[in-house]
Image (cartoon, rainbow, N blue to C red):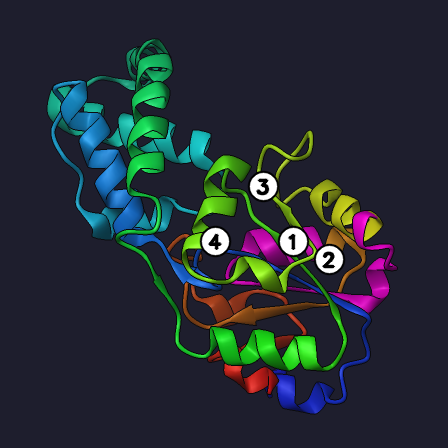
């Protein structure tokens, strides 16, 4: 029998940390726009959104290198050693152009998932401390939350560059718990991928996973978690 959130009411926690991409906001459209504009700047072929979806979740640097590698492999037929060398040679220019394009379109092609606002309202009504923790750079995360009207729910927002390491390392969760002044054992991580689950388990946090979002193309219910949510509205 799969765990579910309803069996965990009332919440035995003091705080909730929520992931952003794939958990609260569907940002695939933003990724596709920014990446394909960057690729055009570099005179490289475009990449289909359905290929990008499995690359999201490990930080923008990883996403960019993976996209460059796939596009170069497909268009130029480079072997592994030459491919890695070419990706690293292109990365500085690609990163600069990607940042510029992402900041320009941030949120324009993204949508808040159904039930997110209801879920956040329910958590706030319970008096729980809320933080957003994402592997997205902070300069992208805060404007996106502001554009979608979600920023006011969170006392803290941390990005992939806010700590020395990114999820699935536990350091970002431990740092977020410290900022909230809460014990990890009483702070739930809500995310959409194995990255969130692995980080939470290593940090000693309970973890709930949404059944939509981006889990690197793998079945989300195969991931070790304490609960699965089809919508954050279930928290109400």
| Res. 77 visible in picture | no
Which disc is residue 150 wearing? none
Instruction: Label 1, secondary structure: give it.
Output: helix
Disc 3 versus disc 4: distance between alpha carbons?
Answer: 14 Å
Query: Which mark's residue is nearer the viewer, 2 or 4?
Result: 4
Q: Element at badge 4?
A: helix
Q: Residues within 10 Å of mark 2 (few under 14, many from 20)?
A: some
Identify residue for label 1: 198
Asked whether 208 or 24 is in front, the reply is: 24
Q: Determine the CA span between mark 2 and mark 4.
A: 30 Å
Residue picked out by circle 2: 201
Q: Circle 3 is placed at which residue position?
A: 159
Q: Is residue 34 visible?
A: yes
Q: Earlier in the sequence, mark 1 or mark 3?
A: 3
Calculate the distance from the C-alpha at mark 2 to the C-alpha at mark 3. 19 Å
Which callout, 1 or 3, points to the residue nearer the camera?
3
**First-in-chain label (2 vs 4):** 4
88 to the left or right of 191? left
Span shown in magenta:
179-200
Magenta segment includes 137: no
The residue indicated by pointer 4 is 146
Residue visible at 22% across and 49% down in the picture: 49
- From mark 1 to mark 2, how far is it between C-alphas? 5 Å
Whether the residues at callouts 3 and 4 have beta carbons within 8 Å, the answer is: no
Quarter of the image where the C terminus is located: bottom right
For the residues bearing labels 4 and 1, Cβ distance under 8 angstroms? no
Q: Position of residue 16 (x, y in %)?
A: 70, 66
């Amino acid at each position: 029998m799969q765990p579910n959130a309803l069996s965990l009411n009332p919440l035995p926690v003091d705080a909730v940390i929520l992931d952003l991409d794939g958990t609260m906001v569907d940002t695939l459209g933003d990724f596709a726009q920014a990446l394909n504009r960057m690729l055009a700047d570099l005179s490289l072929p475009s990449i289909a959104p359905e290929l990008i979806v499995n690359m999201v979740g490990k930080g923008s640097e990883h996403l960019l290198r993976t996209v460059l590698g796939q596009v170069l492999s497909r268009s130029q037929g480079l072997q592994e050693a030459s491919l890695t060398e070419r990706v690293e040679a292109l990365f500085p220019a690609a990163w600069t152009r990607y940042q510029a394009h992402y900041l320009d379109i941030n949120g324009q092609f993204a949508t808040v998932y159904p039930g997110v606002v209801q879920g956040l309202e329910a958590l706030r009504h319970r008096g729980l401390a809320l933080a957003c923790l994402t592997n997205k750079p902070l300069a992208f995360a805060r404007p996106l939350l502001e554009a979608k009207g979600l920023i006011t729910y969170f006392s803290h927002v941390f990005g992939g560059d806010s700590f020395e390491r990114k999820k699935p390392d536990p350091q970002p969760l431990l740092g977020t718990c410290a900022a909230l002044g809460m014990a990890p054992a009483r702070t739930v991580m809500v995310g959409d991928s194995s990255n969130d689950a692995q980080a939470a388990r290593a940090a000693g946090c309970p973890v709930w996973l949404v059944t939509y979002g981006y889990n690197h193309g793998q079945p989300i219910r195969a991931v070790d978690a304490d609960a699965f949510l089809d919508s954050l509205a279930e928290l109400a």
